[in-house]
Image: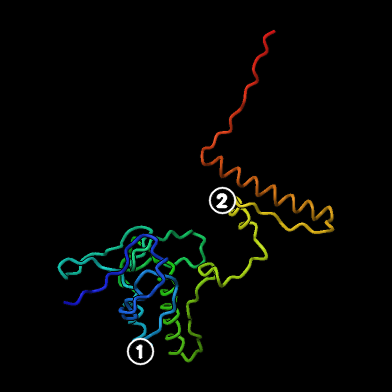
Amino acid sequence: MSMQYQPNSFIGAESTTVPNAFLDRISQARAAGTVMAYEYKSHKQKKQLKEMITILKPEKKKFLGIKYGFKFNIKDRCVVCGTQKIWSSNDKVRPPIPLHKVRKGYPMRGTYCNKHAELHRQYEMLEQQILAEEHGLSFSAYVPSVAKTLNPLATGPLTSLKQEDIQSLSSLGWAIKPPQMGSESKEEEIFRLLIETNSISERIKTLLSEGIVIPIEEEAESDD
C-alpha cells in the first residue's frame, strides 16, 4: 500500500533544508523549507502555470482518503506547508492574501511562508511573462533567489552596520563599538561616543521593558 506524503506541519519549519529524494518535485516544492526556485517539468508555459497552481493550492484535510476543508487555514500559518510566519505591514516581499484556488476564489485566513511567498512571486511573474509574449512584448523570467540573510556563509564578514542594525543588536546585549583610529579628531571621537551611548541606551530600555527594577538604597538616618 502506497503512503502519500504529508507536508511538514511543524511551526517554524523553515529550517528543514534537506530535500527528500523520494518525493517528486511538486511535493518537494510544497514541503516546508528554505527559499527555492522551482524547475518546471514541462516546457510549455500553460502547463508550467498549472504546476505552480498545484504547488500553491492550500493543503486540505484528509479522513479515510477523503479531502475536506483546509488544514492550515489559520492566521499567521502558511496555507501550503503550515509554517508559522508573521509578516510586518511594511515588508516589501509580503505576499498577497492567499485564495483557496490560488488565482481565484475566496480569501484564506492564513498566509504564505518565505518559501511559498517567493514561489507565488515566481507564479505571478510567469503569468506576466505569458501575457507579455501574447502581445509581442519581451519579459525576462523571474527566478527566486535565496536572501543573503538566510545563508550566513554567503554574506562574508560585515564591514558596516545600519543604525537599525546597531539598535537591534544592542537591545540583545551586544556591545557595538566603532573602530578607534590612531589619530582621532574631535568630530570622530564624538561620533564614536554617540554610537556607544546609543547602544547602552538601547540595552537599558530592553532591560527595563523586561520588568527589571533598579533598587534605590535609602540612606540610613543618623542617630543624633
Q: Residue at horizontal 38%, vertical 91%?
A: 43
What amino acid is at disc 1? Ser
Q: Residue at horizontal 45%, vertical 82%?
A: 128
> In front here: 148 or 112?
148
What amino acid is at disc 2? Leu
Q: Residue at horizontal 36%, vertical 64%?
A: 78
The numbered disc on residue 109 is none
Residue 106, position in %: x, y?
A: 31, 66
Label 2 sits on residue: 172
**Quadrant location of residue 155?**
bottom right
Q: Residues within 10 Å of mark 1 (few under 14, many from 20)?
A: few
Q: How is the image coloured?
A: rainbow
Residue 136, position in %: x, y?
A: 48, 92
Label 1 sits on residue: 42
**Quadrant location of residue 3?**
bottom left
Residue 126, position in %: x, y?
A: 43, 82
Which type of secondary structure does the marked residue at label 2 adopt? loop
Q: Is residue 64 left or right of residue 103?
A: left
Q: CA distance from mark 2 to mark 1?
A: 48 Å
Q: Residue at horizontal 68%, vertical 13%?
A: 222
Q: Is residue 152 left or right of residue 34?
A: right
